[in-house]
Amino acid sequence: MNPTNRPSIRAPRAVLVFCLAVAFPFGSAADEPAPVEVSDEPHHHAVFDNGILRVLEVEIAPGDTTQFHRHRVDNAAVSLADTAAVGQRLGEAPAQPARRKPGGMNFSRASGGGYVHRVTNVGEGAFRVVDVEFLRAPGAGTPADPAAPAPSMDNERLRAYTLEIPPGATSVPLRLGDGIRVVVAGDVVELSSAGESRTLDLSAHRWAWRPAGTAALRNDSGQPALIVEIEIK
């Protein structure tokens, strides 16, 4: 066959645009209902509030999209699952899809009146995060523990450490200020500086409020443990 007579395999531009619209069915902000507060968004569930931190557990099924919702305070989200998501700020085009890996963190500042966005899960599995809102004004910050590993995140609001502990192994003791511990994977035993041990109850939640103190963590599971320690500043 003469190459010049071969059927074209190029899709018309209109077909490509249609396919993208089906894959990412984002309407304009003007077509959407008024934004809701994050606490009223159906995919966000406020499960803890001690006046210092508020914790929201977020779960979005594959292909599902949250409502536009407003975050009024700075927050850090720790991913519990391996998936991909598309974020969109109100009045802006959707961002590029971003991979969310277990233990990965995102920090968002909410200066002024906060920010409004929505999230679409474009991955194959559930989008699950622990979203930590910082309710009090930032302080001077506690000095970093010189024995601690390099932080995975460090800013005016928090200092975070991502710990990977092999089965049966124990981490180095960490001296931390008040904060929250997110156990992404593994069964973990806390070993206090006084020699006491406490198995962390993860049956209801994969996180726990952690008062200031010094402790090591032992992985009692048969799989690598993944923990994110967040220290408030």
Image (cartoon, rainbow, N blue to C red):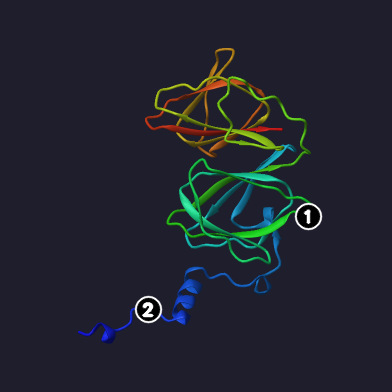
Q: Nearer the viewer, mark 1 or mark 2?
A: 2
Residue 188 lies, with reference to residue 123, above or below; the image says: above
Q: Residue at x 51, y 73 (%)?
A: 21
Q: Residues within 10 Å of mark 1 (few under 14, many from 20)?
A: few
- Location of residue 137 (image quadrant): top right
Foreground residue, 180 or 90?
Answer: 90
Placement of the C terminus among the 4 image quadrants: top right
Placement of the N terminus among the 4 image quadrants: bottom left
Q: In the picture provided, is 1 more to the left or to the right than 118?
A: left
The amino acid at mark 1 is Gly
Label tally: 2
Query: Given the current orientation, which residue lies at the most extreme top position?
Result: 194
The amino acid at mark 2 is Arg
Q: Secondary structure at mark 1?
A: loop
Residue that label 2 marks = 10
Q: Residue at x 45, y 74 (%)?
A: 19
Foreground residue, 192 or 1?
Answer: 1
For marks 1 and 2 on the same chain, the one whose residue lies earlier in the sequence: 2
Residue 171 lies, with reference to residue 157, above or below; the image says: above
Q: Residues within 10 Å of mark 2 (few under 14, many from 20)?
A: few
Q: Residue at x 73, y 47 (%)?
A: 73
Q: CA distance from mark 1 to mark 2?
A: 47 Å
Residue 200: image x %, image y %?
Answer: 52, 28
Residue 220 lies, with reference to residue 107, above or below; the image says: above
Contact (CB < 8 A) between labels 1 and 2? no
Residue that label 1 marks = 113
